Amino acid sequence: MRVTIEEVKNTSLIRLEGDVDIASSEEVKSILIDALASKIEIRLMLEDATELDITALQLLYAAERDAAQSKIPFTLDGSVPSEITSAMTDAGFAKFHFQQQ
C-alpha cells in the first residue's frame, strides 16, 4: 500500500496504490484531513489501487461528505479499477457523490 499527497496548481492530488485496508487507515485519514484543511480542490486517484476495504471506503465517504459541506471540490481523477467499483457497490457505497474528471 502506498498513499501520497501532492499539491499542484491549488489542487491536492491524493494517490492510493495497492491494497488500502485497516492497516493503512491512520495514514489515509491523516492525508485526507490535511487535504481538507488546505481548503483547495481535492482529486483522488485510484487507478493503481488493487483493493479498498470497508475502512478505506468509510474514510473516503466521510472525507467526501466533509468536502461537500465545506464547498471543496472532491473528484475522482483517472480510471477506477473494476475491483474497486465492485467493492464500492458491494459495501453500499455505489452512490458516492464524486464527480469523475
Image (tube, helix red, strand yellow):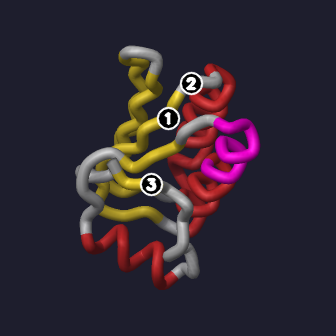
Residue 65 colored in magenta in the image: yes
Question: Picture quarter containing residue 100?
Answer: bottom left
* Residue bearing the label numbered 1: 42
Q: Which residues are magenta?
A: 64-71
Q: Earlier in the sequence, mark 1 or mark 3?
A: 1
Q: Nearer the viewer, mark 1 or mark 3?
A: 3
Determine whether 56 is above or below 74 in the image. Answer: below
Which residue is located at x 58 percent, y 28 percent?
35
Residue labelled with disc 3: 99
Residue at (62% x, 35% y) in the render: 72
Residue that badge 2 annotates:
40
Please, what is the three-letter code of the amino acid marked with disc 3?
Answer: Gln
Residue appearing at x 36%, y 64% in the figure: 51
Residue 41 position within the rendered picture, expressed as x and y whole percent measured from the top left: 51, 30
Instruction: Indicate which disc, 2 or 3, sits on the residue closer to the N terminus.
Output: 2
Q: Secondary structure at mark 3?
A: strand
- The amino acid type found where label 1 is placed reads Ile
Dot 3: within a 10 Å radius of its alpha carbon, few (fewer than 14), some, or many (20 or more) residues? few
Give the percent coordinates (x, y) of residue 50. 29, 61
Mark 2 to mark 3 CA distance (whole Å): 16 Å
**Tags 2 and 1 in contact by the CB under 8 Å rule?**
yes
Q: Is residue 81 magenta?
A: no
Q: Nearer the viewer, residue 22 or 40?
A: 40
Residue type at the position of mark 2: Ile
